[in-house]
Amino acid sequence: MAFSFNFDVPLQTEDNRGDDFQEDKVKDENQDPLKSQSKPVETSDSTHKNLKEAVEHKNTADLHTHIENCVTETVSLGSLPPLHYINESVFEQTAPERDDGEKILFQTVTKNTDLITGVYEGGLKIWECTFDLLEYIDDEGETFSGKRVLDLGCGAGLLGILALKRRASRVHFQDYNSTVIEQLTMPNVFLNCEEESEEEDKGKTDGSPPPKRRTLDSSHDLLTERCRFFSGDWTSYLSLMESEDPTPKYDIIFTSETIYNTDYYSSLHSVFHKLLAEDGVVYLATKSHYFGVGGGLYLFQKFVEEKGVFQIKSLKDIDEGLKRHIVSLTFKKLQS
Ligand SMILES: C[S@@+](CC[C@H](N)C(=O)[O-])C[C@H]1O[C@@H](n2cnc3c(N)ncnc32)[C@H](O)[C@@H]1O
């Protein structure tokens, strides 16, 4: 590994190591409980070249095992439907007991890290900009009815789950890590589908199958009919999508806390460019700057402007703690 640092606080150098570092950290933790979950980050030059190939995850057979003994939480924001998800701390504590082909569960816990570049990209915890974007959607009253939605770099998948609950016609979830998709995103979607099925069950006395059995079946149908799940690097994900005929297009692409690494800007931009529908919108939520990792809104905006494909518009600035932002990207209109 080349070096290790903290994702949310300035990179420690001989000059700034010491009291300032501690104070910054304590201040952040006081301002935002989510910050206290921040851990060191590792980058690795060698792993960087071996980014994970994209695959689709279709097997829902293990879902019950993953949610059987999990502890769940619910976020209820304004007029949004309640969103259920697996409790992160319990998930983390039990992680070493579970098996994952990528071996990231063991690594993240033993190395106490939020990110290992090219190995684990942070999807096992919910980052605060996800909640900013949920709040923004609540304020704006976005309805997803009939829309095709991509939750890009989804992690726990709350943004995609909201779209699903608000009747999006199709929701695709993408995360770098297969472990995240299988052990967190899919179970979370399932938890929320289950509730929908239970709602539908209420009041039916027509001799249909016993509620529990039907709940499981209809949840499964919902999952397979309206959702698809993918893991892998963005370049590879784009190739996989482009190999389909027709190539899927999205009316809305959500992406939260995904512009921390400037090395990924090109592949991220290509996904937007090739998969966003002509009149579609990318909603991007981000911190101003990702200390230590180097990326942030200013550099990403510059990158987008240089490419000249998208118009980037500021939608909301959040000033508490580390500055955060929500921006939209839409295709520049062709001059007639
Ligand atoms: C910091 S996490 C944010 C997770 C989630 N969006 C949230 O706000 O809680 C960054 C996410 O971006 C995705 N990601 C980062 N770099 C990627 C890459 N090069 N290819 C594919 N996915 C990537 C990972 O899936 C990871 O979950």
Image: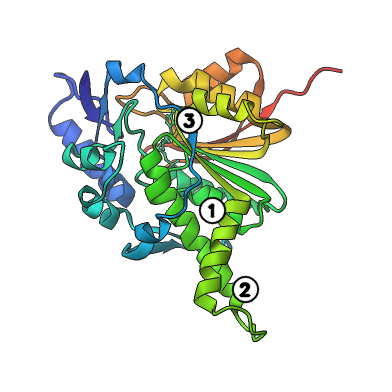
Ligand 1 quadrant? top left
Is disc 2 placed on a helix, strand or loop?
A: helix
Q: Is residue 138 visible?
A: no
Q: CA distance from mark 3 to mark 2?
A: 35 Å
The amino acid on which the numbered mark 2 sits, given as a three-letter code, is Glu
Q: Is residue 191 above or below residue 182?
A: below
> In the figure, is residue 183 to the left or right of 285?
left
Q: Position of residue 192 (x, y in %)?
A: 50, 61
Q: Is residue 79 visible?
A: yes
Up the image or down, 138 lies above or below 35; here it is: below
Residue that carries the numbered disc 1 in the rendered image = 161
Q: Is mark 1 within 8 Å of ligand 1?
A: no
Three-letter residue code for mark 1 = Ile
**Residue bearing mark 2:** 200
- Location of the C terminus by quadrant is top right
Q: Secondary structure at mark 3?
A: loop
**Residue located 22% across and 37% down the image:** 107
